Amino acid sequence: MPATHYQQLLPLYQQFINSSKRGLRRKPDGNKITNGTIDNYSNTYRLLEQFATTKQFDLRIRLFTRLNKRELITEKNYWKKFYRAFTDYLYEDLNHYDGYTGSSIKNIRTFFNYLITEKQLPVGQFHKQFFVPKEDKPVVALTPEQLQFLIHDVAFTNSLSPALQRTKDIFVFGCTVGLRYSDMLQLTALNLEQQLTQTYLKVHAQKTNSFTNVLLPQYALVIINKYKGGKKLLPLISKFNFNKQLKKMAEQAGWTNEISLTKQKRGRAVMQSKTTAIQQYRFCDLISSHTMRRTAITTLLSLGVPELLVRKVSGHAPHSKEFFKYVAVSQNYLDNETQKAYLHLGKAPLNKNTPVFTM
């Protein structure tokens, strides 16, 4: 290979996707790249392709064994120009926010690491200057009281259409076992294990390649028995329709209280109107299939189940950043409930016959 050689970026990126699909490229722990992650890679490919066409930007990779100082500066400036132009395209032309833009940049950085570590191509370390924007997304989860309402309120259940009743059953089951929706769709009778009088749900999570063993409460068994006889434990509903029906169900439940959310671009709140940077959403409009897993985890944490045991159920790693978001939400709930108890104690006079305990 000559001292300097150029290749087009997009064909190399397609090789990166194909290698991930075929299992030639794997996670650091040796497990296959999930289909969801590969879909994200493909989406970034389409963005790069559209960007190159729309902005007439030549996407190329320079392979080199050595560069003099002037060439090094030229190459560094090329990738600075690319990063600025591509993020401007995502923010300004496509109106994306920090979360989506950051995900795309992260995929591109992963692609460059693949070129270096797996294809052994001398492309330099310029991709390390690509800043990955981050956006903290709110954890939308049901409170224990809301989940109890869905489980026990017969009048509400009877008010729902058959389709929404199925949606509610799946949702309640998911809020109990904490599985991702994709894993729930694959459940069969083989995932059930009877131990004396207890029934357990044994699941292998595709995304984390971890096994969970969850004790099923009686109301979850009632849901399973309701749909007994099918190939799967639960009715099969596409994720799109499931999310659509969830919002209708939540609206009928009266969960229409407004929630303030802030979108960010380049680390700054985006003005949604002339007077505020905060956009108002109804709680029911924010519920989705992700809410099940979030609710299961925050409910267990809120009710005092130790984090170690909750992680056993959820399959999160010990230092998972995602898991600590759930901890923060459950702590807020716990603080609110504790404050209510303290206010109650402050209003109610102590009975003189009530024993007082001291530490």
Image (cartoon, helix red, strand yellow):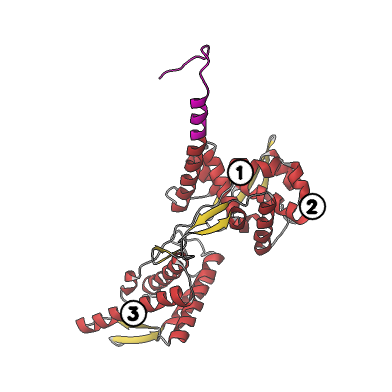
Q: Nearer the viewer, residue 350 or 237?
A: 350
Q: Nearer the viewer, residue 327 or 255?
A: 255
Q: Secondary structure at mark 2?
A: loop
- Specify which label sits upstream in the sequence, 2 or 3: 3
Estimate how packed mark 2 is, as few (under 14), some (14 to 19) or many (20 or more) residues with alpha carbons within 10 Å: few
Amino acid bearing label 3: Lys
The residue shown at (66%, 47%) is: 172
Residue 10's x, y, as percent?
45, 82
Amino acid bearing label 2: Gly
The residue shown at (30%, 88%) is: 2
Estimate how packed mark 1 is, as few (under 14), some (14 to 19) or many (20 or more) residues with alpha carbons within 10 Å: some
Residue 187's x, y, as percent?
67, 54
Residue that protrudes farthest toward the left in the picture: 69
Q: Secondary structure at mark 3?
A: helix
Q: How many numbered markers are drawn?
A: 3
Find residue 214 and name its label.
1
Residue 357 lies within the magenta run: yes
The residue shown at (78%, 54%) is: 162
Find residue 81 and name its label.
3
**Is 37 displayed left or right of 74 in the figure?**
right
**Is 233 displayed left or right of 259 in the figure?**
right
Amino acid bearing label 1: Val
The residue wearing badge 2 is: 229
Residues drawn in magenta:
338-359
Which quadrant: the C terminus?
A: top left
- Specify which label sits upstream in the sequence, 2 or 1: 1
